[in-house]
Each structure stands twice: as C-alpha cells, then as structure tokens.
Image (cartoon, grey):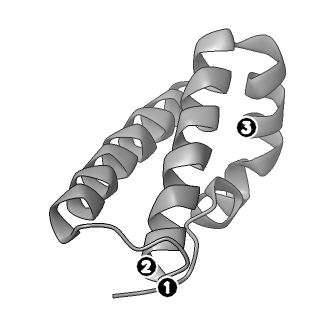
Amino acid sequence: MSHTPHELAEEFPEKVELMSQLKQSDAHFARLADEYHEINRVVHRAETNIEPMEDLAEGELRKKRAALKDEIWAILTKA
C-alpha cells in the first residue's frame, strides 16, 4: 500500500490546466474535485497513522475516492 497522497494534479498531470478551468466554470466539477480532495486527505492521514481509522471505514473511503476519480476522469475526457 502506498502512503503517497493521490492529488488530482499528480493523477492527471496532462489535465492540470483543464481542471483549473473547469473548477472555475463548472460548479459540478468543482464540487467533485473538492470532495475528492477532502476524502483523499482523510485517507492519506489514515494511511500515515496521523488519524488512524478502522480498516473497513478506510476501505469504503478508498472506494469513494476511486469512484470520484473515475467521474472526474470522465468529465476531463469529454471536455
């Protein structure tokens, strides 16, 4: 398991400019990006034992993060 934070800019480096534009022009995309960031921060803090949590709860957050990432990617590929 990696303890590296999964920031969107690192996940989709070729789409950084587009993500910035969409955050300004698309409220839905901005909400998804914000939610991804919040969940990603919680998962990273759990992985690094800064704020440990139950494995099941962490697993559910990872699934939610992955679903958000998929939805964000779908928007980025259509834009």
Q: CA distance from mark 2 to mark 1?
A: 6 Å
Query: In the image, is 70 to the left or to the right of 79?
Result: left
Q: Is residue 55 above or below residue 41?
A: below
Query: In the image, is 25 to the left or to the right of 75?
Result: right
Q: Residue 78 location, x and y as percent?
A: 52, 26
Q: CA distance from mark 1 to mark 3?
A: 24 Å
Q: Amino acid at mark 2?
A: Glu
Q: CA distance from mark 2 to mark 3?
A: 26 Å
- Residue at left 55%, top 78%? 50
Tally of numbered discs: 3
The N terminus - image quarter? bottom left
Secondary structure at badge 3 equals helix
- Residue at left 82%, top 36%? 20
- Residue at left 20%, top 70%? 55
Image quarter of residue 4: bottom right
- Looking at marks 1 and 3 on the same chain, the residue that comes earlier in the sequence is marked by 1
Instruction: Evaluate if marks 2 and 1 touch, with contact meaning CB atoms under 8 Å apart.
Output: yes
The C terminus - image quarter? top right
Instruction: Evaluate if marks 2 and 3 touch, with contact meaning CB atoms under 8 Å apart.
Output: no
Q: Residue 39 location, x and y as percent?
A: 49, 48
Residue 47, disc = 2
Q: Amino acid at mark 1?
A: His
| Residue indicated by mark 1 | 3
Q: Is residue 32 above or below residue 53?
A: above
- Looking at marks 2 and 3 on the same chain, the residue that comes earlier in the sequence is marked by 3
Q: Residues within 10 Å of mark 2 (few under 14, many from 20)?
A: some
| Residue indicated by mark 3 | 19
Q: Amino acid at mark 3?
A: Met
Image quarter of residue 11: bottom right
* Residue furthest left in the image: 56
Secondary structure at badge 2 equals helix
